[in-house]
Amino acid sequence: MGLLILILLVAAIIYVFKGIIIVQQQQEVIIERMGRYERTLTAGLNFIFPILEAPRGILTKVTQRGFDGQQYFILKQVDRIDKREQMYDFPRQNVITEDNVSITINALIYFQIIDSKSAVYEIANLPEAIEKLTQTNLRNLVGQMDLQKTLTSRNTINTELRTILDEATNKWGVKVNRVEIQDIFPPADIQASMDKLMKADREKTATITEAEGLKEAAIRKAEGEKEAAIRSAEGEKQAEILRAEGVAQARIIEAEAEKEAINRIIEAFADKGQPDKYLIAMKYLETLGDISKGQNNKVVYMPYEASGILASVDGIKQMFDKPAK
């Protein structure tokens, strides 16, 4: 009786430790009964029969720090299948481009297990299979490109490689979300030549930019001088027009004043008669005054019509002396 109780107690302890499985969120456990697939345990509290049923493990890559302080990826078998997105950082590999240049590439892949059953039963070593598949297709893609295109087509390589891997890993229950080319290292001599070429291109670009700047400055300066000349000419033209208009206006005003003066003279001499003789006499006198103006002008002769002028002056005197009628 005591032995039976002991056996039952041991069985109960084994069941507690082996028969109760707590699965965390975003994890699944594959359960086999007598070596055959039975069911998939999801997050929460689950019960199995420890003797007849057991979890099926799966290989995964985990990081481990070595004695040298560096981190390394190692393969480890676990019975919990992580359905979160995972990242594999593959070691650098040598790849030959289409123009026979050997380069070193480091790639990252982000994938997620969608179907746990397929990930366990459709492929023996899932991490190794994904790594080798990535490396092989990466060599094929880069082998179709020359060095220059490889260096400038990372997005193209990422997209094409992701499509290829996603199709190939679909039957394994895996979805490849992203592929990233982390580093591309050409040989040292090629790198030195590229640096020289880039320096020459930068100097060329700087020279062209400087020449274009000088050209633009010269064009702007010429346009500015042209605009200034046009505006100066327009200003001079406007000034000449205003001066001409001023002279014309002055002449008109002077003519109007002279007209008014003549009219008043005519009115003043209307009752004395012959105002035209008075006007002619006054013009003679004004002309004589203009001739005699100036410091160096000396009148040493009398005009030919001087007797006529004197007669006109005498006539003016007689007109003023004639009494009004």
Image (tube, rainbow, N blue to C red):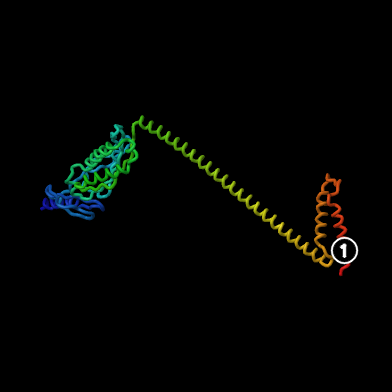
- Quarter of the picture holding the C terminus: bottom right
Q: Amino acid at mark 1?
A: Phe
Residue topped by disc 1? 320
Q: In the displayed structure, does residue 304 sit left or right of residue 236?
A: right
Q: Nearer the viewer, residue 295 or 40?
A: 295
Residue 303 is situated, as x and y percent measured from the top left of the image, at 84, 49
Q: Quadrant of residue 151?
A: top left
Q: Position of residue 15 (x, y in %)?
A: 17, 52
Between 96 and 215, the one nearer to me in the picture:
215
Q: Nearer the viewer, residue 42 or 237?
A: 237
Residue 180: x, y in percent?
31, 43
> Percent from the top left, x then y, of residue 244?
67, 54
Q: Give the answer, above or below, for where 143 lies relative to 79.
A: above
Position above or below: 323 against 162: below
The residue that appears at 82% across and 59% down in the rendered structure is 277
- Residue occupying the point 86% across, 60% down: 315
- Crowd around label 1: few <14 · some 14–19 · many ≥20 (10 Å): few
Residue 224 as seen in the image, left or right of residue 101:
right
Q: Residue at x 30, y 33 (%)?
A: 99
Mark 1 element type:
helix
